[in-house]
Amino acid sequence: MVVDDVLTLQTEGLAPLRAPVMIVALHGLFDMASAATTAVAGMISGDTITVGEIDPDPFFDFTQERPMVEIDEGELRIIRWPDSRFDVVRGDGAHDLVLAVGTEPHLHWATYAQCVIAVSRRLGCEAVLTVGSTAEALPHTRMPTVTGSTTNDELAKRLGLAAPSYQGVTGLVGVLHAELEHAGIPSISLRVGIPHYLVNAEHPTAVAALQAHIGHVVGINIAADHRDDIDRWRQLHDEVVEGDPQLGLYVRMLEQEYDRRAEEAIPSADDLGAEFEQFLRAHRDDDRPDDPDDERLGDPDDPPG
């Protein structure tokens, strides 16, 4: 199976993108409480253009990830298959965005990763940012921690990030970062923590934290107001803890540990965004010489098509 057999990409009539960055979020093992996919899906606006999709048929065991049937206008039955879609969002900052939101596939991960890389190259993405959410020992009463890593040595130095140190079972995103590194495409991973004792609940605070870091890194304003959802779910979380004295003691222990530790996982969002922009600008200048084999969709300096 090759990429062209499963990837559909329609860019005809699409004006050149402005220094695009791809953001990837996949529902699955590393999307606890759906915080990552919710954060990225919340960035889709009315002006979003869907430019590509990956055929789900070769990648899923449909006894595990079942399609949904819906009734449209009381008559037509529609089957909703697990999808992987690429949407273009015109940003109001330094970068346009390519949002890749979908479901982690069961099969053919290497081919799936190459589909993402093919779209990134075709649209001229300067970097790929993946976002995830994982269960961690942290209290729901504190701001969730966002941590980051990159395999790019220069990015690691500029942003104060560590190289990935996790060893063990991985997901599609782990494979994707390895393939991106091999392809020479800079990539960053951002992950937000979800209180492990409440993984089956919603966590709008985690969604807001992820969106804040994405916005600062990419240099865009994400217009999302989560205050009502945060207040409502905080009350629900508190009620769960108050109903279990043993859990209440555990949460207080987590609070003490959280407060004791210094902020060491990631630099401030403002510093992160400034350094990321400097990195991209330097690499953009390095890539200025014409390359006859470059198949990217236009150039940011070309007139819109």
Image (spheres, helix red, strand yellow):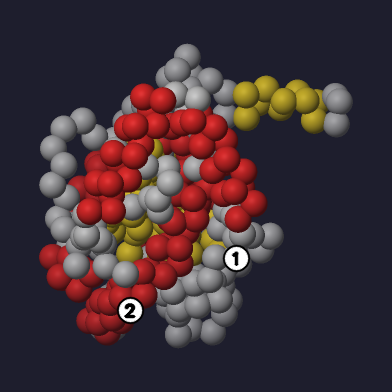
* Residue nearest the viewer, comparing 294 with 148: 148
The kind of residue tagged 1 is Ala
The residue labelled by disc 2 is 274
Report whether residue 255 is seen. yes
Taking the spot 85% from the left edge, 24% from the top edge, the residue there is: 75
| Image vertical order of residue 120 relative to residue 103, above or below | below
Q: Position of residue 295 (x, y in %)?
A: 37, 66
The answer to which image quadrant residue 187 occupies is bottom left
Taking the spot 59% from the left edge, 54% from the top edge, the residue there is: 226
| Image vertical order of residue 41 relative to residue 75, above or below | below
For the C terminus, the quadrant is bottom right
- SS type, badge 2: helix
Report whether residue 113 is seen. no
Residue count near mark 1 (Cα–Cα under 10 Å), binned few <14, some 14–19, many ≥20: few
The answer to which image quadrant residue 216 occupies is bottom left
* Residue nearest the viewer, comparing 30 with 128: 30
The outermost residue toward the top is 63
Q: Position of residue 56 (x, y in %)?
A: 48, 32
- SS type, badge 1: loop
Taking the spot 45% from the left edge, 85% from the top edge, the residue there is: 301
Residue count near mark 2 (Cα–Cα under 10 Å), binned few <14, some 14–19, many ≥20: some
The kind of residue tagged 2 is Ala
The residue labelled by disc 1 is 223
| Image vertical order of residue 298 relative to residue 133, above or below | below
Q: Position of residue 199 (x, y in %)?
A: 43, 32
* Residue nearest the viewer, comparing 188 with 281: 188
The numbered dot on residue 61 is none
Image label count? 2
